[in-house]
Amino acid sequence: MITKMANIIKDGTINLQSAPSIASYASAAGKKEGEGPLAEYFDYISEDVTLGENSWEKSESKLQQYAFTNALSKGSFSESDMDFLFAGDLLNQCVASGYGARETSIPFFGLFGACSTMAESLSLASIFVDSGAAVNAAAVTSSHFCSAERQFRFPVNYGGQRTPTAQWTATAAGCAIVSPHGAPPYVKAVTVGKIKDMGITDANNMGAAMAEAAHDTISRHLANMGQSIEAFDLILTGDLGKVGSDILIELFQKDDIDISEKHNDCGLMLYDLEKQDVHAGGSGCGCSASVLCGYILPEIAKGNLKNVLFAATGALMSPTIVQQGESIPGISHAVHISAF
Amino acid sequence: MITKMANIIKDGTINLQSAPSIASYASAAGKKEGEGPLAEYFDYISEDVTLGENSWEKSESKLQQYAFTNALSKGSFSESDMDFLFAGDLLNQCVASGYGARETSIPFFGLFGACSTMAESLSLASIFVDSGAAVNAAAVTSSHFCSAERQFRFPVNYGGQRTPTAQWTATAAGCAIVSPHGAPPYVKAVTVGKIKDMGITDANNMGAAMAEAAHDTISRHLANMGQSIEAFDLILTGDLGKVGSDILIELFQKDDIDISEKHNDCGLMLYDLEKQDVHAGGSGCGCSASVLCGYILPEIAKGNLKNVLFAATGALMSPTIVQQGESIPGISHAVHISAF
C-alpha cells in the first residue's frame, strides 16, 4: 500500500505533497495562432493548416505528435522514459490522440474532457507521479479548427457565418511531462471538476455554458486549500472567451470576490480579438494546451509568475444531443502550478 | 509525498500493494441481453430499448445511471461517499457519461477507451484508492445498440444487413466501486494498454483489430508480474468475439502458450451466439462492463473464481477516419482481480 496518509483533502481536491515537477513542455500551433500575440513563444508553427496531411484529423494528430516529440527532446527524455501517456481531444472517439499515439509504445490512457483536457491530463499525470504510480508521465492534447468546424458546425468550405458569441477552435497542441523532481514549475494541488449545467442550449455560446463550472471548481479549490485569490498571481481559465469570462467575473462578484485583476483566459490570450476575427475568443483543447505549454509554464519557470491556478474548461456536449434540445453541461479542472 | 516505493513495476504494470476492494458493483442490461445466458445475474433488465426516453443517447445515459445508483445502494454508499467518478462510453464526446453524471455532484474524470473503458476506469479508480488519492471511487461505463448502430454503421430502421464478422453492440452498463478495505474481490495489479494496429481496415471486423492489443497486454502483465497463465482461473477478454478470440488463441500458440483452456470473452458470454443472431458476438463498453459487474465479480466474491485477469479491449477508430482509409488501432487494459 502506498500510504495511509490519504492525500485527498475533500470534495475533489488532491494535495500533491511531493509537488512533482513539470520537467518539460512544448507547444505546436497553426498558422493563424502563429500570427497572434503569443507567436514568439511556440516551439512549432505550421506554415499551413494541413501540416502536409490529406485529412484534418491527420493534421491534428501531427500537431499532437510535434508537441509530444518536442517536449521529449527539450527535456532530454526518450520515449521509453515515459511510463504513461494521458491524451485526449475533441474529435469523435478521440482519434487525434489515438492515431497520434499509435506510433509510440507508451502505455496509454485515453481521456475526454472536451476543452478541459489539458488540465485533466496534467492532473492525472501529476497524481500518478506524486503517488509513485509513474516515474515520468506525459499529458498531451490538441484541437484543429477545420476538424472541429466540420464535426461540430459546418465544413469550412461551406462558409457559414459565425455568431458573435462563437469561439474559434484553435489549431494547436501542447504537451507537459511530469517528473518526480527537478526544476520548477511544480504541481502543488489539483481540484477535479464537477459537471455543471447552466441551461445553455446554444452550441455557439459555449463560454456561457462553461462559466459556472469554472466558478465552482475555482471556489472549491480555494475553500478546500484554505486559500484566497491573493495566493495566486494569475487565475487562468481556458477557454471561456469574452462572454464566459464576463459571466465568471459576475459569478464571483456575487460572492463578494473581485477576480477581475487576477483573471485571464487562454481564449482571450491566444488571438488578437480585434484584428484576428475570432469573435468571442479561442477555444478547443489545443487553446489552453498551447497557451499553458507555450507561454505560462516558461513564465513560471523563469519566476515571472509565482503561483498560477490553471482552470481549463470543457463543454461536454455532442452535436447529436444538442439537436435533441438538451442543454450543454460544462466541466473545469484546476491545477495549482507554482515556481517554488 | 505519498511514497518513495514506486509501485510501477515496469512497462505499464502497476502493483497495487494495498489490493483495494471492489466493495460494490451492479449491472444494467437491455431486453435482448436480459434474454441471454447471463439474464439471472443482472441487477436490472429493461423491458424495452428506450428505457422510457425519447432518444437512444438518453436511454444509454439512463442505463449508466441505473448501474451507478444500484452499485451505491448495494454497497450502502451515498453519492457523497464517492470521491471521484471515472466514466466513459462509445458515443461522440462521451455524452452517455457526461449526461448520465450531470445529475450527480461527484468530481468527474471523463475517459475514452472504446470497449476497453470498463478496464480503464476500474484501473484508474483502483490506482487512486491504492495511492490514497481517493477513499472511494466509482468506475462506470455503458453502450447501447441503437445509439452505436446509428453512429458507427446505419440507423437501425434502415435495416442494413450485418456481415458475419460483425459484433452486436450490447445495450448494457456496469459500475464498480473501489474502496480501501473490505470483502473480496480485490484488485491486485493493473497493466495499462499500448496502442496496437494490425492493419485491419474493416470496421465490421473489430475483434481482429483488437486481438493483438489483448495479446500484448496479457503477455506484458504475465512477464512484468512474473506469472504464468496458471496463476489465473480465467483470462477474460472483452470484446473480441468469435473472430478476435480465435486470433488471440493463435497469437499465444505462436508463443507456445495454450490459452484456450483459461480464456473466455465477454462478447461470447453475454449472448447465445447460436440463437440470438449476434453474429461474431457482443461488443460495446457495456458488454464487458455488464459481464464483469453482473456475473464475474459475484463469482469471485463467492470464491467460485479465485484469480481473474480481466483484459477489456477497445477499437480506437471513428467512422470518419475509417472512411479515410486508415486502419483500426486497438487497445487493451488488464486488471488482476482476486478472491484473496
Image (cartoon, coloured by chain):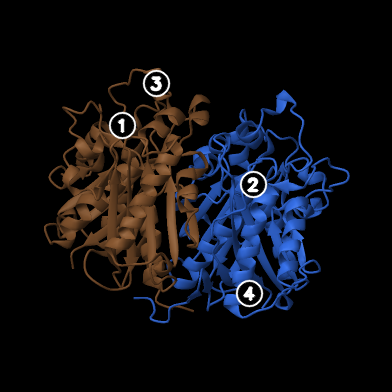
Chain colours: A brown, B blue
Q: Chain of mark 3?
A: A
Q: Can you tell which mark lies on residue A157?
A: 3
**Pointer 2 and pointer 1 on the same chain:** no
Q: Secondary structure at mark 2?
A: loop
Q: Mark 1 near mark 3, Cβ–Cβ under 8 Å?
A: no
Apparent side of residue B27 relative to residue A171 in the rendered image (left or right): right
Q: Position of residue A192 (x, y in %)?
A: 38, 55
The residue under label 1 is which amino acid type? Trp
Which of the numbered marks, if any, corresponds to residue B200?
2
Amino acid, disc 3 = Asn
Residue type beneath disc 2: Ile
C-beta proximity under 8 Å, tags 3 and 4: no
Q: Say which amino acid is labelled 4.
A: Leu
Q: Which residue is mark 4?
A: B222
- Indicate whether B113 appears above or below A85: above
- Determine crowd level at label 3: few under 14, some 14-19, many 20+ residues with C-alpha closer than 10 A: few
How crowded pointer 4 is (Cα within 10 Å; few <14, some 14-19, many 20+) is rated as some
Task: Specify the quadrant that holds the C terminus of chain B.
Answer: bottom right
Quarter where residue A49 is shown: top left
Secondary structure of the residue carrying tag 4 is helix
**Chain ID, mark 1:** A
Residue at mark 2 to residue at mark 3: CA–CA distance: 31 Å
* Residue at numbered disc 1: A168
Q: Residue furthest right?
A: B275
Q: Chain of mark 2?
A: B
